Image (cartoon, rainbow, N blue to C red):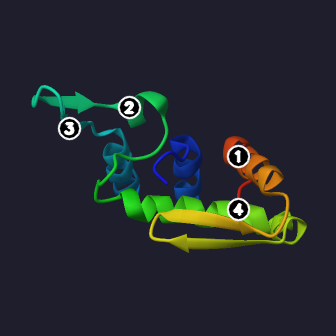
Amino acid sequence: MTRYRVPRLMKELGHRIADKSVMHLIKMWLEAPVEEKDEKTGKARRTTENKDNRRGSPQGSPISLLLSNIYMSLFIKQWKKRDLDRKHGAEIVNYADDLVICCRRNAEEAMRDMRAIMEEPWPDSK
């Protein structure tokens, strides 16, 4: 779950973290480029895909798992608040920074609902 929306996450964290230096550190982690080795050429290249797209954190970064889990818990709250687990006969199973939505019916509709939740602005969940 490395493709969450950074501005939404930062806003949510701002409700819970009063220390501006911690918020700054998190922001720096999210904006840090990642150096990857090109499989074909063997050369290292720096990517900033997450920064450019304003989505997610660099895969494998120290903060990635924690932030993904915070975002995922916010998603699950929205899913349950909308009673989508009952609507789709669904159970959300999550492990580390991944989740699976197991549906008894309407899997395609559940996927649309999941994408809609991820894309729309959420109300503050203070």
Residue at which label 2 appears: 49
State the CA–CA distance, disc 1 to disc 3: 29 Å
**How many numbered discs sit on the rendered protein?**
4
Label 2 sits on a secondary structure element that is: helix
Label 3 sits on a secondary structure element that is: strand
Residue 116: x percent and y percent?
Answer: 75, 45
Choose the circle earlier in sequence order: 2 or 3.
3
State the CA–CA distance, disc 2 to disc 4: 28 Å
Please identify, in this view, whether the residue under mark 2 or under mark 4 is nearer the observer: 2
Q: Visible in this render: residue 48?
A: yes
Choose the circle earlier in sequence order: 2 or 4.
2
Residue at which label 3 appears: 36
Q: Indicate whether 91 appears above or below 34.
A: below
State the CA–CA distance, disc 2 to disc 3: 12 Å
Task: Name the amino acid type tagged 4.
Answer: Ser
Q: Indicate whether 92 appears above or below 36.
A: below
Q: Horizontal placement of 6 versus 22: left or right?
A: right
Q: Residues within 10 Å of mark 1 (few under 14, many from 20)?
A: few
State the CA–CA distance, disc 3 to disc 4: 36 Å
State the CA–CA distance, disc 2 to disc 1: 21 Å
Q: Quadrant of residue 105?
A: bottom right
Label 4 sits on a secondary structure element that is: loop
Q: Indicate whether 99 appears above or below 3.
A: below
Q: Which mark is residue 115?
A: 1
